[in-house]
Amino acid sequence: MLLSRTLISAAITTTLAAPVAYAETTVGGYGEFHYNNLEQTATSGAKSDKKMLDFHRFVLEFGHDFNDHIRFFSEVELEHAFVKNGSGADSTPGEVELEQAYVEMDIDDNSSFKAGVFLIPVGMLNETHEPPAFYGVERNLVEKEIIPATWWEGGVMYSGHLDNGVSYDLALHSGLNASDGNIRDGRSKVAEAAGEALAYTARVKYTGISGLEIAATVQLQDDLSQGTAAEAIGATLIESHVAYATGPFKASAMYAQWDLDAGAPDNKEEQSGMLVEASYKVTEKFGVFVRQSDWSIVVNEDKSQTVAGFNYWPHEDVVFKFDYQTEDHDNATESKGFNLGVGYQF
């Protein structure tokens, strides 16, 4: 009888413990600390220099594999080091944000489905923006102001890939809330986001040749005002980019454009930007780059920025950065100066 109870107990323990054999929880993260030293001059001659130290981002990532084909991933970010309640003199620039939190399930060997909060499949940085992965202390302004990265929404997305190097993503998700035409400020960040007008995003990417990436994204949204304006503001985003790396040399170019329909402010009906970047890894640990960005949010107010500098990686997941930038805004300010940064990922 004792032997039978022992065998039964062992069988129950084995059965209950079976999921542990394939369940796995992972923790990761990244962060970056910046020093900006910029001289800014308005057309009136007024000075508003920017000399600032900022722990820009502190991010923790949590993931869990439930089994071989169902997984969870999340990303929690603290921006600008400190957050407290208040307004005016009592406020701080910091934010706590849930940038990703989704369940993903494999449909077959070539396709998957995710639901929750995820990064929009657009641009070169929006999905891969860990500091060691890109040149320059600050993220490029075309993706920041036009796309607008970092950009996440809540919804569902189907992704697939073919054996010839073609992959694709189809997403239905929450849309922007920007009746004033300000795309970046229209991100709801899935905080009780308005669901009156959803958005549709499709991307196709080709990586079938070593070192080459070509991608294009289209997004459609029926009404940027989310039903609050007298007339719906339809919006279409198109983005395309190409990047090619051979040996130590890499070059990339990107173009993005928003077209806003009737109901949008007249001076913001078309918002666009483009950039080109070239980099060269002198050694495995040291690389130099130059980037030119041009963009426009408001009609007759073109903006441009030139940035050049270097990255130093003492470890592949740790980077020190320096760059010098000049920036010109029509009918606004001009700035020049340098930036220093340190970043990591794990």
Image (cartoon, rainbow, N blue to C red):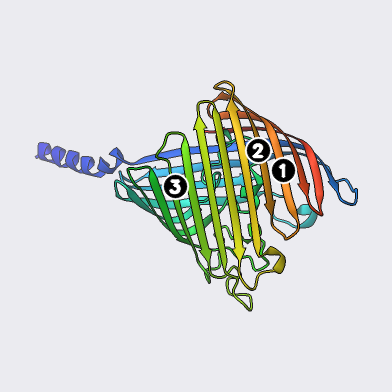
Farthest residue in the left direction?
1
C-alpha gap between disc 1 and disc 3: 28 Å
Return the mark for residue 205: 3
Where residue 184 appears, as percent x and y from the top left, is 64, 57
Q: Is residue 6 left or right of residue 142?
A: left
- What's under tag 2, amino acid-wise? Arg
The residue closer to the viewer here, 2 or 317, is 317
Q: Mark 3 Cα within 10 Å, few/some/many (few <14, many 20+)?
A: some
Residue 4 seen: yes
Per the image, label 2 sits on a secondary structure element best described as strand
Q: Mark 2 Cα within 10 Å, few/some/many (few <14, many 20+)?
A: many
Per the image, label 1 sits on a secondary structure element best described as strand
Q: Which residue is mark 2?
A: 291
- Tell me what residue is drawn at x 68 percent, y 51 percent: 295
C-alpha gap between disc 3 and disc 2: 23 Å
**Within the image, what quadrant is residue 282 found in?**
top right
- What's under tag 1, amino acid-wise? Gln
Per the image, label 3 sits on a secondary structure element best described as strand
- Tell me what residue is drawn at x 65 percent, y 38 percent: 291
Return the mark for residue 305: 1
Return the mark for residue 46: none
